[in-house]
Amino acid sequence: MCIFAFCLFLLLFEICKKGIEEMSLLEVEKLTHSFGDNVLYRNAGFTLNKGEHIGIVGQNGTGKSTLIKICTEQIMPDHGRIIWQPNTTIGYLDQYAEIDHALTMKEFLKSAFAKLFDMEAQVMQLYEKAADGDMKSLELASGYQEQLETHDFYSIDTAIERVANGLGLTAIGLDRSIAEMSGGQRAKVILAKLLLEKPDVLLLDEPTNFLDKDHVAWLAEYLSTLENAFLVVSHDFSFLDKIANRICDIDNDTITKYYGTYSEFLRKKTLLREDYIRQYAAQQKEIKKTEEFIRKNIAGRKAKMARGRQKQLDRMNKMEALEQKEIIPHFHFPALPLTNTEHLRVKHLAVGYHYPVLSDIEFSIKGGQKVVITGFNGIGKSTLLKTLIGQIPAMQGHFKFSDQVIFGYFEQDLSWDEPEQTPIQIISNAHPDMVIKDVRKHLARCGISSKHAMQAIGTLSGGEQAKVKMCLITLSPCNFLIMDEPTNHLDVQAKEALKAALMDFVGTVLLVSHEESFYRDWAQRVISIEKK
């Protein structure tokens, strides 16, 4: 009897243990949300369990980033519940968060361990009291000391160096002040602090946007071995394949959770979609056949049978046709005439804001050349482009475009003077002579649906906003395209469309990109920028 009881105890223990391991950290129930007439989710839901690594996927505009913002209560949904397990610590990657510019990078990263440093200060105070004979203080100090050791307090510098090195921050210098950093560098510092904090749940929206391929590889390895749970939005599917063991797919107003890697998800979704289409087609055939029978016999001698068939039809659980929300984009950049003479010469150029981030830059570009600028993220590539187009002044040296150059510029920052304006209004304001019908046509060609075209630009996804920026460029003929990380927010279809457009463009191209796979097939020259 005792042996039986013991075995039962072990069984119950294992069941409880498994239950704890599968415990939901986050439950999303009956989620419904829309922007105007554009419904993102309808009675959708999913769970995030302990240890789950979930990749959130879907085409541009389906609501991936919005879902993250709903989970962090930045956006309140129209309906539904977001239930976090009590005492769950959440880390959200906000690439545009305000940082105290007076801090150095190391000081900012150390703030991830603020509670531990406070505990150390308490320990020191308690030891001082213990020195005066307060034994209770000694006991408390010993307890706190154990907690510090458990949380690897005395290895903080090692942890900081590991993460900083993995994300390419040591090359910038841990003693560099936040004020002296570019936007890309600050974004990486924010990500580094988030990783060091090790919250119960990480919420990451496009974490690879500011990372080079080596740093993407490091982050993938780091996240794949992480014990804590996370939700990650990313258009880098090779990255997702390495880090995710679950996929949440946003499609046709629903959120479907798949178990397995991204590659496994693609196979499963394809099979399920094909099966659904077959079932839908078979049901439609049956409905059409039944309706035809009812129409022919409703007033004849088979009227009773027809009424019975009608009742069956009324009770039928009718399948809905799959809606294809995404319009396949097609970009075309109209080119002005040009010659193959020198279009741009840069000599001994220094760029920066308060101090030079890059110095002694030299290169030239001939008309019709397609040139890519690379270098580790945060080195100052965006600052260089902003200097070339005249947004900020050069600090030293000079550059000169040929007189025939008329450029089109794509800026990676998704900022708008009036974020409440719709894409239709933005295009119309830029081209007041264009009739609304043509505005809609051009937006649709660039992959913007009619619903999104009438929605405030600030509420659209990063990918949709990027397409509107592309649309503006396609409506202004130029012979020199300058583009700063244009693929950051684009899905696969939009990236392929952009690649095709750049390959077809007969003018000059100067592109900053960290995606070698994007430019490898068409770039004629790659300029690698390094610190001097």
Image: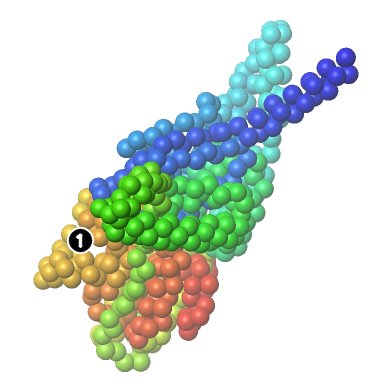
Label count reads: 1
* SS at mark 1 in the image: helix
Vertical relation: 464 (above or below) 89: below
Residue 154 spot, x, y in % from top left: 69, 35
Q: Residue at 44% across / 72% down in the picture?
A: 496
Q: Position of residue 356 (x, y in %)?
A: 42, 62
Q: Position of residue 244 (x, y in %)?
A: 59, 51
Which residue is nearer to you in this view: 30 or 335?
30
In the displayed orientation, state which residue is furthest to the front.
Answer: 301
**Residue 267 vs residue 480: left or right?**
right
Residue identified by numbered label 1 = 424
What residue lies at 50% left-to-right and 40% top-to-bottom?
46
Q: Is residue 233 left or right of residue 447?
A: right
Q: Is residue 236 visible?
A: no
- The quarter of the rendered structure image containing the N terminus is top right
Residue placed most toward the observer, 455 or 183: 455
The residue lying at 48 percent from left, 61 percent from top is 278
Position of residue 383 relative to residue 99, above or below, is: below
Residue at the extreme left of the image, as rendered: 433
The residue type indicated by label 1 comes to: Ile
Residue 458 or 424: which is nearer the viewer?
Answer: 424
Q: Nearer the viewer, residue 453 or 467?
A: 453
Residue 268 visible in the snapshot:
yes
- Judge from the rendering whether residue 512 lies leftward or rightward of residue 89; answer left or right: left
Instruction: Give the x, y percent position of residue 156.
Output: 64, 39
